[in-house]
Image: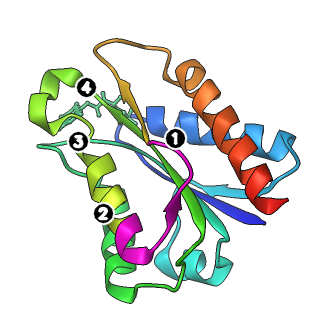
Amino acid sequence: MRIAIVSGTVFGTAEEVAWRASELLAEAGLDVTFRPHWQLSELLEHDPEAVLFVTSTTGMGELPEKLQPLVSGLEQQLPDWAGRPAGIIGLGDGGYGDNFCLSVDELEALYELLGLVMLQDSLRLDASETVTHVEDAVPWINEFTALLQAWHA
Ligand SMILES: Cc1cc2nc3c(=O)[nH]c(=O)nc-3n(C[C@H](O)[C@H](O)[C@H](O)COP(=O)(O)O)c2cc1C
């Protein structure tokens, strides 16, 4: 099963979490590809059988600027990924109130549009409560790994 990991970051934390996810999935024997900057054409050509987005929220509840073209491209192209398993890890800050982790909501809407199947609830990491994002994400990533393996079996 080809798994693609996509990340969106401003200060690099989401990318660190994405690297850790890619290490853990690979250690579990899964075929995972993480690129910090996927072009839409590369991702479509890769034709992932499972997808994991790891992204922070910035501005007033927006996706990081570098991730926006990829997400808009997917919304427009609507690749036939229906029924494929997927997950989302979001990084945000509870101090932003109603805008907390809004990128996750935006990606959940994209997943719904594409018919991707959420394997578990999205993880929302709150920078007002933790500075150890990578460590905190590990249990969620392990669960994601187990669910992917069960899906694959
Ligand atoms: C200018 C700025 C705007 C932000 N806006 C939001 C926001 O709207 N919602 C939110 O949940 N977090 C917001 N954050 C918090 C970041 O998402 C959080 O610190 C995250 O851990 C950063 O991850 P990164 O290093 O991958 O960019 C903002 C941070 C900055 C500096």
Say above or below: 101 vs 50. Answer: above
Quadrant in which the N terminus is drawn: bottom right
Q: What mark, if any, has residue 58 been given in the picture?
A: 3
The crowd level at tag 2 (other Cα within 10 Å; few <14, some 14-19, many 20+) is few
The residue to which callout 2 is attached is 109
Residue at 56% from the left image edge and 25% from the top image edge: 134
- For marks 3 and 2, the one nearer the N-term is 3
Q: Amino acid at mark 3?
A: Thr
Q: Amino acid at mark 4?
A: Asp
How much space separates mark 4 and mark 1, taking CA atoms? 16 Å
Helix, strand or loop at mark 4: loop
Say above or below: 15 vs 139. Answer: below
Q: What mark, if any, has residue 15 been given in the picture?
A: 1
Ligand 1, by image quadrant, is top left
Foreground: disc 3 or disc 4: 4
Quadrant housing residue 42: bottom right
The residue to which callout 4 is attached is 93
Does the magenta portion include 118?
A: yes
Q: Amino acid at mark 1?
A: Glu
Foreground: disc 4 or disc 1: 4
Whether disc 3's CB lies below 8 Å from ligand 1 is answered: yes
